[in-house]
Amino acid sequence: MHSPTVQKLIDLFSKFPTVGPRTAGRFVFYLMHKPKEEIEELITSISNLKKNIKICPLCLNPYEDETGLCSICSDSRRDKSLLCVISNEMDLMAIEKTKKYQGLYFVLGGTVSRLKKADIEKLKIKELEKRIKNDPEIKEVILALNSTAEGEATILYLERLLKPLNKKITRLGRGLPLGGELEYADEDTLSSAFESRR
Amino acid sequence: MHSPTVQKLIDLFSKFPTVGPRTAGRFVFYLMHKPKEEIEELITSISNLKKNIKICPLCLNPYEDETGLCSICSDSRRDKSLLCVISNEMDLMAIEKTKKYQGLYFVLGGTVSRLKKADIEKLKIKELEKRIKNDPEIKEVILALNSTAEGEATILYLERLLKPLNKKITRLGRGLPLGGELEYADEDTLSSAFESRR
Amino acid sequence: MHSPTVQKLIDLFSKFPTVGPRTAGRFVFYLMHKPKEEIEELITSISNLKKNIKICPLCLNPYEDETGLCSICSDSRRDKSLLCVISNEMDLMAIEKTKKYQGLYFVLGGTVSRLKKADIEKLKIKELEKRIKNDPEIKEVILALNSTAEGEATILYLERLLKPLNKKITRLGRGLPLGGELEYADEDTLSSAFESRR
Amino acid sequence: MHSPTVQKLIDLFSKFPTVGPRTAGRFVFYLMHKPKEEIEELITSISNLKKNIKICPLCLNPYEDETGLCSICSDSRRDKSLLCVISNEMDLMAIEKTKKYQGLYFVLGGTVSRLKKADIEKLKIKELEKRIKNDPEIKEVILALNSTAEGEATILYLERLLKPLNKKITRLGRGLPLGGELEYADEDTLSSAFESRR
């Protein structure tokens, strides 16, 4: 029912995370009503992404400047004995916002639900092993993945894999989140909250 | 905290309908991991939008082909005595999907909550008046706007404005939607459902 | 884990509509902390229900006073040519609140999803037939049931059943509810809203 | 609009936790359609509550048997060096379900948002102080209250109040709950999850 140009763009936007065909349609009609200059600004910004952004060879996080390393890996004040493994850049942002963690990061590129070869190969697991092996300064590897089934499966896999490297391997503490109520907490969360009481 | 290129694109995506900064961030990281060809395909599709899409002079709906009118306005089988005024292209799509309405459309370009001059001038109201005046074939103008406060305010405004044109002016019937339960229906909806019983 | 007295009461409250075991537990602990007089007030009120409430022989709605009929059926100002069939007393309340309907009611006692004999016999269908046959004043029977699958199935069944009685049989109009948006309306609702435009 | 008997019972049910007038109405109509024996069973169960249930003098938890203490306080296998302070019986149930905690309990009777005298006096704070002072076996007092603003305020108040008693005072660990995602965690929760990593 849509014209080919509109349909093509709806199809592309529908692949964006959290976007379905209806929202994709709203994006297209939104762009249709924008003046030419705003469309060109968007196009330039998208193409700049590929042009300006590099991937930090240490943590695999995208960065922009000319130093050869991202701003965190090149920051001499960061604690180089801590390496925090995260699924993606959004999680890195969330942790940085707390201003509590002062160590380094490694972007794994996802989590896996099934430990099949094809799934695991999508993650930067070899790069992670190499990163840890090559850096004797690292003392603790924090597996900061989601407490979901996928995150847990990936943590278990990494714990086993990284064991021979003889580093301290930790995972985030579980407990009641801010605003959490005992009555509605699941048994695992409540057990962990008791264990990590202080 | 983001690099300038990333932040710029987050800002632009944040203006898209229904998108906040967090989702905009996910869009940017999604694009960052796409191969060059897919990014170019997206850029081409966005720029085609401005290049290929024209606005139909009769209904103000965007269209693509070479006929000078959109596919609905140029379809001789459509009932030219009915003009359905809608807020935007998404509502037109929703109505076309029902396959029940066979008349023509007019895209108003929004609804207004306050009847202030500045707000009203954003709508294509003069164009609507002209469209109706110029076409003696039109017998009924259906104000198919949302049943929200904004939609209702706009309907009231248009009813008053279009009255001198001596056409039948109608609005959509109110009632229980599919799946609706009497017990949870508001009094207005229930009253309308009784009035429009059949 | 609960003591027998507590568990017994949790089991009974769990059968209340919308109440699960957790909410039932909260009810029991709530009562446990109430003073003796409040508990007695509750017990008296519950037992008064069976003592004081009668079922109106005409509409099957519960009522309390001494007239032999409920306050609606005995009200000479109500329009006796209209009989509104509803599922339960809560729907009757919802309709009365609109203050638009001035006819009489009949409480069917539920709706059925499957038209099996056992299900249908739970409804007061024979009583409804008798009520309509015995009252030549009734001109229109309004089937005011939910727009859900169950409600629709029951309406279809009643339409067929009541047809030989030669009364006007109507159902509530469907359309956009108050606050409804075209873009999110299903096709049936939108089609009905167009048909019942006015 | 309801008859006095119905309205009275709606009013009483509306005071139940989580119940509004609409749900209270459904409860009343539910009871109205129950046979006499079921109503009597409910009435007997409610009155048994006051008759059979006693309050344990040690933990203030309700119990039923003849021992003079509740089944937890009288259980010689429980760890008498741990006293877990909870808001209400539902929280006790939630903790018992985890089967991880083997100590004793104390039911505080609520939490307070404002530390005003009138609010605090509703809680069993004097009883708690006395309970701890009288039992030299207690080594640790766990303040297992909700992570809500109210719970936190009450924890802070109790920490200060119980300090002179020279017991270890702890609170539940905060962190990601089961199923929690880093990206959506608040900063406090994420900081705690890092601190309690293991």
Image (cartoon, coloured by chain):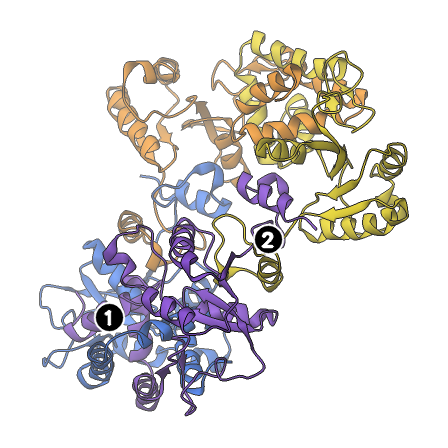
Chain colours: A purple, B blue, C orange, D yellow
Residue topped by disc 2: A177
In the picture, measured across the screen, residue D192 lies left or right of residue D128, that is left
Which quadrant would residue D142 be assigned to in this image? top right
- The residues bearing labels 2 and 1 have C-alpha atoms spaced at a distance of 37 Å
Q: Judge the density around disc 2: few (<14), some (14-19), many (≥20) Cα neighbours within 10 Å.
A: many
Q: Position of residue D32 (x, y in %)?
A: 56, 18
Left or right of D142, for residue B78: left
The residue tagged 1 is: A12
Seen from the viewer's position, the closer of residues B160 and A35 is A35
Residue drawn at point x = 66 percent, y = 36 percent: D91
**Mark 2 residue element:** loop
Q: As displayed, is residue D163 above or below residue C30? A: below
Q: Position of residue D198 (x, y in %)?
A: 56, 54
- Chain of the residue that carries numbered disc 1 in the rendered image: A
Tag 1: amino acid? Leu
Marks 2 and 1 in Cβ contact (< 8 Å): no
- Residue mark closest to the camera, 2 vs 1: 2
User: Could you tell me if residue B29 is visible in this image?
Assistant: yes
Disc nearer the start of the sequence (2/1): 1
- Residue at 21%, 57% (x, y): give it: B97
Does residue A52 appear to the left or right of D139 in the view shown? left
Q: Residue at x 17, y 59 (%)?
A: B102
